[in-house]
Image (tube, rainbow, N blue to C red):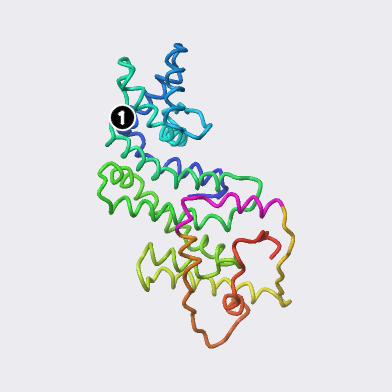
Amino acid sequence: MPPPHTGVALSEKIFDLLYGLKHIDRAIKKIRESVKYVKGSHSQVRKQNFLDYVKLVSVGVKKGLRQDILTRWNSTYLMLDSALLYHRAFEHLALSDSNYKSCPSAEEWDKVEKVWRFLKVFYDATLVFSSTNYPTANLFFPSISQCYLTLKMALEGTGEYLRFMASMMWVKFQKYWADFSVILAIAYILDPRYKMTFIELCYKKAHGEDSLEILVVCNKLYSLFDEYKSKSSHPTTTSVSSRANEVSSHLESMEVESNLDLFKEFDDITSEEFSYAHKSQLKLYLDEPKMSRNVNFDVLTF
């Protein structure tokens, strides 16, 4: 992908990858018609009946139904996100309203939920990439990794529809991953809360144990360090700012749910150390204890 590598550009790239939504499934079409039946109705009686069923099934949310735009996959995700909250209300409406004929079956609701979970990973990634209020270089790798692993799992899964969607995206994403995973990984290593541990975890899941890919990252990291060291005539020192500012607070709130399993596993494991005879400033940095990822932190002040 040519420069600029801005958050907006990366978000648009993910949009292009979601080509599979053009081959929309029958179950999602039923969701679209169901939302249109209730939301676009001029009949106040129909709308009131639906609201009564919402109260009956005790849906404790205030999120309204969202109608999607066919050419925007993220709006389809938001439509599914809202419709799933009210699926029991739709089922009750189908029992009482003979004119409502587009209610998905139990099997179709299950399929819709799987598609929703699949899309959520990419939707959350676009939220991270498209932000303009904080630096995002150190946020790219976990989001891209989760997208990669989600596609990989879908290709290996039993769901034919998800396999079809993933296969349409896989070839393009493989090229994107190959071009950018190394530099994104290095940016993440330089975040003192994660260093090598999270990178090792992601590469292990993506490529298996003892993959050559992680060695490529390590070699590139030390190569870059040596290059910068040779050009610098002054020793560098690092310090951590205790400033708890709006940026770091916002970063904590933006940690997407789809990455939580990776982060939980990250918290539970201990990274295997790389052995080097000479401990350079980079090696000393990597050997230092990681900072807690639960504290307010501005990576630019480190």
Q: Quadrant of the C terminus?
A: bottom right
Circle 1: element type: loop
Residue shown at the point (33%, 33%) measured from the top left: 24
Give residue 79's quadrant in the image: top left
Any magenta on residue 256? yes
- Could you say where residue 295 lies in the image, as x and y percent from the top left? 64, 61
Main SS, magenta residues: helix
Q: Please, what is the three-letter code of the amino acid marked with disc 1?
A: Pro
Any magenta on residue 247? yes
Q: Nearer the viewer, residue 100 or 141?
A: 100
Q: Left or right: where does residue 249 sit relative to residue 57?
A: right
- Could you say where residue 213 lies in the image, as x and y percent from the top left? 41, 68
- Could you say where residue 5 lies in the image, as x and y percent from the top left? 55, 50
Q: Nearer the viewer, residue 177 or 78?
A: 78
Residue shown at the point (53%, 31%) measured from the top left: 62
Residue shown at the point (43%, 22%) measured from the top left: 50
The residue that label 1 is drawn on is 104
- Number of labels in the image equals 1
Q: Left or right: where does residue 194 sit relative to residue 39?
A: right
Q: Residues within 10 Å of mark 1 (few under 14, many from 20)?
A: many
Give residue 104's quadrant in the image: top left
* Figure check: 211 above or below 169: below
Residue shown at the point (46%, 20%) measured from the top left: 39
Please give the range of residues in magenta: 246-261
